[in-house]
Image: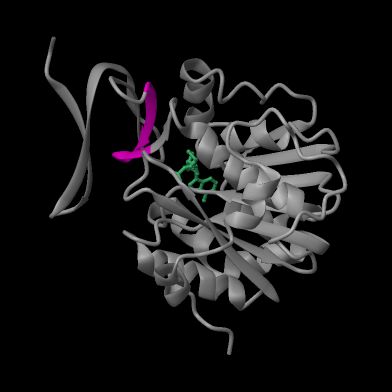
Amino acid sequence: MHDLWFYEKHTDGYEVRWRITNVLHREATPYQQLAVLETIEWGRILVLDGVLQLAEKDEYVYHEMIAHVVMNSHSHPESVLIIGGGDGGALREVLKHQQVKNVDLVEIDQRVVEVSRQYFPQVAGSFDDPRAHLHIADGFDFVKTSDRAYDVIIVDSSDPIGPSEKLFSVDFYLDLDRILKSDGMVVVQSESPVFYAHHFAACHSNLLQVYPNVAVYLAPVATYVSGPWAFTIGSKQHEPTIINNQQPVLSDLKYYTADLHKAVFCLPRYVQDLIPKPE
Ligand code: SAM
């Protein structure tokens, strides 16, 4: 067997590597380097600019947790906006809620959607749902000009470099606030509190400038750098840490449960210490 490895470089002192059996796809899109690799331990992986975005074996953890916490904290999420998320994983989870009437998904890179549909049909299989509407556009520009109103907004972006950077800014959060209904909620993937603690803390303080209630929860994503992954909710009214949705919690999930909803907001001390206190 060829000795092929994919190296995910984080700093000069730290990289993670996966042994692979095949390079299924590789291209330079107008926005980024995109690859699909076959690994030995984690199934197929989607890689953007050298950073793993999803692995077949554990993608359900991240996608369930970015979607179902906020979908259950909100009392009646019918209209949802997803920024990024071109692999379709968050969309798949949101559409499991029968009360959802409309989901707009705004992905900057059409090739991420096309390649995900081809190589990850179990993840990207929901784009044909009649409730789903795909917009190929920059999410930052989309929200600036949008006149729609959403119950829930999910920011499923890549790391805050390149075109994703502005998706972590106060400006962007102010625009989200404008297009959220009066009891709307936003959830943001807010990076590793271990390895990218500065990004995590900055995201929190930016959300605090806009939303009266900001809450953090964690999920372990084995294939993301350092493991624990943070999600940060900004809420106008609903308390994020409890289930306000009157619909029964979906029972066919692999990670999220009603008990877990309460547990994930209990944060270890080192994460509490990273969170800026409101002034
Ligand atoms: N779960 C993943 C993670 O944290 O590694 C991220 C999922 S998804 C693949 C991220 C997507 O955000 C990418 O497909 C990327 O093209 C998209 N993206 C980046 N910047 C964007 C922008 N300004 N507007 C819309 N989509 C953007």
User: Is residue 208 placed above or below 242 in the rendered structure?
Assistant: below
Residue toward you, 5 or 249: 249
Q: Is residue 83 visible?
A: no
Query: Residue 263 appears at what percent x and percent y?
Result: 60, 56
Q: Quadrant of the C terminus?
A: bottom right
- Residue farthest to the bottom, as pictured: 279
Secondary structure mostly seen in the magenta stretch? strand
Report the side of 148 relative to 89 (left or right).
right
Classify the position of the N terminus by image quarter.
top left
Decide whether residue 48 is among the magenta residues: yes
State the residue in front, 55 or 110: 55
- Say if the magenta span includes residue 195: no
Residue 104 x %, y %: 72, 41
Q: Position of residue 109 (x, y in %)?
A: 50, 37
- The answer to which of 73 and 141 lies nearer the viewer is 73
Q: Write down the quadrant of residue 179 in the picture.
A: bottom right
Q: Residues in magenta?
A: 43-52
Residue 149 sits above or below residue 250 on the image:
below
